Amino acid sequence: MKAQRRVFVSAASLVVAVVGCSPQVENVAPDNSAKASNESGSADASSQHDASTEPVWSCPRETFGANLVLIPVDEGNPYCIDDREVTYGEYKKFVDAKGSDFSGQPPECEWNKDYNPNSKYYTLYEDVGPMRCGPSLDEAEPGYPLRCVDFCDAWAYCAWSGKRLCGLRGAKPGKVTVVPRNSEDLEYGSFRVAATTENEWFNVCSQGGTSEYPYGNEYVASTCPGANISYEAADTSRSQCSGVEPPYDRVYNMSGGVEEWVNICDLDGCVYHAGPAVDPYASSCAGGFGASTIGNSWSEGGIRCCSDAVLVAGSSR
């Protein structure tokens, strides 16, 4: 079994050693093979100002899967994020379309020749409860959130869908982002930046760094998916686990839900976020960070993609 590291950011809870991902990074061309158009018609446009004087941005339209939501930022260009997790049905279309084509992955993922999720059920840590994987793609309910894929699977799916893994704002496109350790305190690089608004995922979860939870600063039990996340459909029309202020009110299950891979790595592994909303700390945007080697699908990892915004009018800042 491949090892993984699970870390709760403030208090030491559980640390498991991992084998690192390589710091060797290369440019990777976007993977457009067998790509479908977005069946849900996702795209947002920001046009509150005169297009002749202010830039107007939109999310790309030629994408597949969840709707993209445009996220403004104080400095730099906006970006887009999926409004929910990737489902088994969406991921199966990717696996079927790719077949034996494993191109479009970064050099760190050259070993990856199987996109199928891990479908074995098991218990690893008695003190944090059962960690469950499965079912297989053929047995899964197509509308339920995908789980138990590794970092490379997540990267490949997002690239195929016309998007990319969420990561640090302004990071070089097409590369695995490796954050060095802090030479003074030897803190893991990935965790040092994970709970900052530079992390696209955390920025949305915390409503631009203004709240501890997606829905506010006070923990409200049962607002976000709990331990039975395998049996809850990724239905945004019924979810109460969303932000409050626009545009965050159109992004769901950033707390709870399945763990979601993020393109923020260090020499020990790559970050994932979320997981079941089981207590106030683990349910917070800054709590419950985990990290694992890029080849580890035992982390229950799921997928939520991001993309760069598209300038449709005016000039960029």
Image: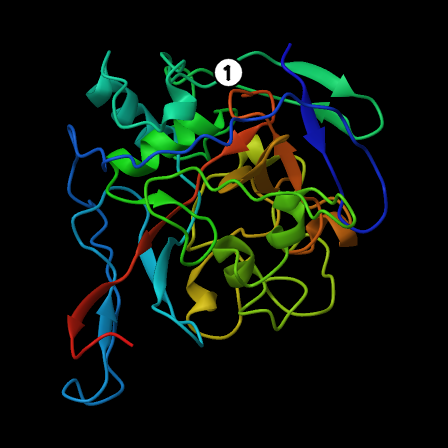
Give the x, y percent position of residue 225: 61, 45
Frontmost residue, 239 versus 27? 27
Give the x, y percent position of residue 82: 38, 51
On the picture, is 88 further left or further right than 194?
A: left
Picture quadrant of residue 50: bottom left
Looking at the rendered structure, the kind of residue marked 1 is Asn
On the picture, is 214 further left or further right than 39?
A: right
On the picture, is 237 further left or further right than 312?
A: right
Q: Is residue 141 among the parts visible in the rendering?
A: no
Pointer 1 local density, CA inside 10 Å: few below 14, some 14–19, many at least 20: many
Q: Name the residue at 22% across, 16% down.
A: 101
Q: Is residue 7 among the parts visible in the rendering?
A: yes
Frontmost residue, 276 versus 167? 167
Q: Is residue 226 above or below residue 224?
A: above
Give the x, y percent position of residue 206: 59, 64
Q: Secondary structure at mark 1?
A: loop
Q: Name the residue at 40% across, 13% down.
A: 111
Give the x, y percent position of residue 187: 74, 45
Toward the front, the furthest residue is: 183
Q: Name the residue at 42% across, 55% down.
A: 237
Q: Quadrant of the C terminus?
A: bottom left
Q: Quadrant of the N terminus?
A: top right
**What sort of colour scheme is used for the picture?**
rainbow
Q: Which residue is mark 1?
A: 118
Picture quadrant of residue 128: top right
Q: How many marks?
A: 1
Q: Is residue 121 above or below residue 58?
A: above
Q: Is residue 83 above or below residue 52?
A: above
Q: Name the residue at 51% across, 14% down.
A: 119
